[in-house]
């Protein structure tokens, strides 16, 4: 791995270009053409340096919420309790989804129009 590969990794990790030709953009930043940038990324994947290229979403920024649920169940009760626990989790998930849906409807009803992006004067 040379300095260009390291620069490409830095770009990919810190902010993969969201444009129609991302490898062209990466190439411009590291001093090579689109084809070379693409080949280098593929080589890094084949070598196992890059395992995955994908999006990471800021769930809070998107208004999403999550909850981690855990239970300590004695082994002798786990086979009898698991189906009941699965039903409870499914029910809670459904209730939560409906609460979010109702919350969205209430917000829309209060504003009576879609939100517009804020613009600076």
Image (cartoon, grey):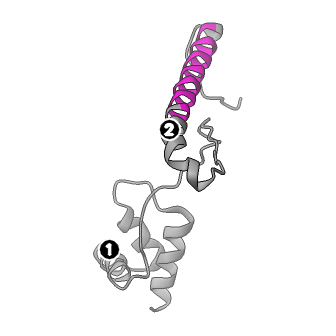
Q: Residue furthest front?
A: 76
Residue 72: x percent and y percent? 66, 51
Q: 27 or 84: nearer the eye?
A: 84
> In this rendering, is residue 3 above or below 88?
below
What residue lies at 43% left-to-right and 76% top-to-bottom?
Answer: 50
What residue lies at 45% left-to-right and 84% top-to-bottom?
Answer: 5
Q: Does the magenta stretch include residue 90?
A: yes
Q: Is residue 85 left or right of residue 52?
A: right
Residue 2: x percent and y percent? 46, 92
> In this rendering, is residue 108 above or below 116?
above
Q: Is residue 61 left or right of residue 8?
A: right
- In the picture of the structure, the residue carrying the numbered disc 1 is 38
- In the picture of the structure, the residue carrying the numbered disc 2 is 86
Residue 67 figure quarter: top right
Total numbered labels: 2
Name which of mark 2 and mark 1 comes first in the sequence: 1
Span colored in magenta: 88-109
* Secondary element at image label 2: helix
Q: Please tell me the numbered disc located at residue 73.
A: none
Q: 37 or 69: nearer the eye?
A: 69
């Amino acid at each position: 791995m040379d300095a260009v590969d390291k620069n490409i990794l830095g770009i990919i990790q810190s902010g993969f270009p969201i444009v129609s030709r991302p490898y062209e953009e990466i190439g411009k930043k590291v001093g090579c053409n689109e084809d070379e940038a693409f080949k280098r990324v593929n080589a890094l994947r084949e070598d196992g340096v890059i395992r995955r290229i994908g999006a990471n979403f800021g769930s809070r920024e998107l208004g999403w919420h999550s909850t981690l649920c855990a239970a300590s169940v004695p082994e002798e009760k786990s086979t009898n309790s698991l189906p009941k626990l699965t039903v409870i989790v499914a029910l809670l998930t459904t209730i939560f989804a409906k609460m979010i849906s109702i919350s969205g409807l209430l917000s829309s009803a209060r504003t009576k129009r879609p939100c517009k992006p804020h613009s600076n004067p």
